[in-house]
């Protein structure tokens, strides 16, 4: 079985993964930035291991031997699912594999924005050195005692809630329906925005959630509140967020995701001193990759044996 690993995988990871695949899986690696090589390989493979580079309807037209797209992660918004179904291609993901990594990154972004790490680094790099100016000192803050609102309460948010509680924060959440076994308060989204010192997004990007955090909802947030997004960039109206950050209504933002990715180096949000921006890497740890690849290899074996695939979405 010929498998295309569409990812900028380091040599050690490729060596380890090929060894785990065994003789029945021929693993071919292709960088996500090398579109020409990807298009040349696509008609020859039965399986694509997909990370973030979009798989479009045009790609499925060319993938004449393709039987399975295995997402290494959970979000499927970068895959043309209707086209996959029309061409008889199964689509699977790896739920839970990256939950801890994303939860830890969300926590890291909360701490980094509360302690104003970009601004403190700028102080270190400024001529003459010295400590932070008084105005900046007044904005340095702790997580303990603050209210954190989690928008969505799936696996990532539930792990994060445990971390936050251990650090002395109060957790509330919004979800389609309350979780009967949750010790945290379930509140409507608009109420959550008005009560939270930090708002963290943990919902998938769908037509119903696109620009969920728009200008109106940003206006509902506390003055000086922090927005954290490790989910999908399209959940946020970025122009409205930029205005709110510039005007001081939003105190800071920690963003691992952007509406258009890879994010442009001159993106207006990256120029603001109260923004921490990352290149969609909250999920990316060695442990996450190992868990994702183990599921991917298992699904390739199941595909070869004609068995039911794990976590099939299409």
Image (tube, rainbow, N blue to C red):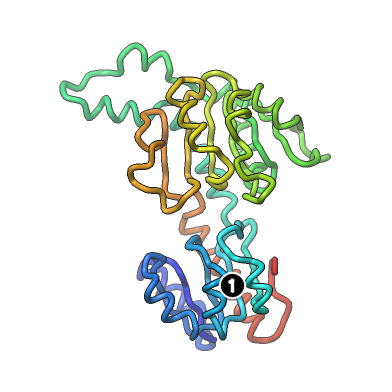
Residue reaching furthest to the left: 128
Residue drawn at 16 percent across, 24 percent down: 127
Residue 255 in the image: x percent, y percent? 48, 40
Q: Residue at x 64, y 42 (%)?
A: 157
The image quadrant that residue 307 belongs to is bottom right
For this view, does 72 lie left or right of residue 180? left
**Compared to 200, does 230 lie above or below?**
below
Left or right: residue 116 versus residue 229 is: left
Residue 22 location in percent, x, y? 51, 84
**Occupied quadrant, residue 308:** bottom right
71 or 215, which is in the foreground? 215
Which residue occupies 52% across, 73% down?
59
Q: Tell me how many marks there are.
A: 1
Q: Classify mark 1: residues with Cα within 10 Å, few (<14), some (14-19) or many (20+).
A: many
* Horizontal and vertical percent position of residue 133: 30, 14
SS category of the residue bearing label 1: strand
Report the side of 8 relative to 156 (left or right): left
Identify which residue is drawn at 37% across, 15% down. Answer: 137
Q: Residue 115 versus residue 233: which sits nearer the camera?
A: 233
**Which of 4 and 268 lies nearest the eye of the viewer?**
268
> What is the quadrant of the N terminus in the image?
bottom right
Q: The C terminus is located in which quarter?
A: bottom right
**Residue 245 image point, x, y percent:** 46, 26
Q: Residue furthest right?
A: 180
Q: Which residue is mark 1?
A: 69
| Foreground residue among 128 and 244 | 244
Q: Is residue 241 above or below residue 128?
A: below
Q: Is residue 115 above or below residue 150?
A: above
């Amino acid at each position: 079985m010929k498998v295309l690993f569409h990812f900028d995988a380091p040599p050690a990871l490729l060596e380890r993964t090929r060894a785990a695949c065994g003789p029945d899986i021929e693993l071919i690696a292709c960088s996500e930035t090398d579109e020409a090589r990807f298009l040349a390989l696509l008609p020859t493979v039965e399986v694509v291991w997909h990370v973030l580079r979009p798989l479009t309807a045009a790609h499925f037209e060319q993938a004449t031997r393709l039987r399975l797209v295995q997402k290494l992660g959970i979000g499927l918004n970068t895959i043309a699912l209707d086209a996959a179904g029309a061409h008889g291609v199964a689509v699977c993901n790896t739920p839970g594999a990256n939950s801890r990594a994303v939860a830890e990154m969300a926590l890291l972004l909360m701490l980094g924005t509360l302690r104003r790490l970009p601004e403190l680094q700028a102080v270190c790099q400024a001529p003459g050195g010295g400590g932070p100016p008084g105005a900046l000192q007044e904005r340095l803050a702790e997580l303990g005692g603050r209210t954190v609102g989690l928008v969505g309460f799936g696996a990532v948010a539930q792990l994060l809630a445990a971390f936050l509680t251990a650090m002395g924060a109060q957790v509330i959440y919004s979800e389609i329906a309350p979780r009967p076994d949750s010790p945290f308060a379930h509140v409507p989204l608009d109420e959550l925005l008005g009560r939270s010192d930090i708002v963290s997004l943990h919902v998938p990007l769908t037509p119903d959630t696109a620009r969920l955090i728009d200008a109106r909802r940003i206006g509902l947030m506390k003055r000086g509140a922090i927005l954290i997004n490790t989910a999908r960039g399209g959940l946020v109206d970025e122009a409205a967020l930029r205005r709110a950050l510039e005007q001081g209504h939003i105190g800071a933002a920690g963003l691992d995701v952007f509406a258009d990715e890879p994010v442009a180096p001159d993106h207006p949000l990256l120029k603001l001193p109260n923004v921490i921006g990352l290149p969609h890497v909250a999920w990316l740890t060695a442990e996450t990759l190992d868990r994702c690849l183990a599921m991917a290899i298992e699904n390739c074996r199941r595909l070869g044996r004609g068995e039911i695939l794990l976590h099939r979405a299409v």
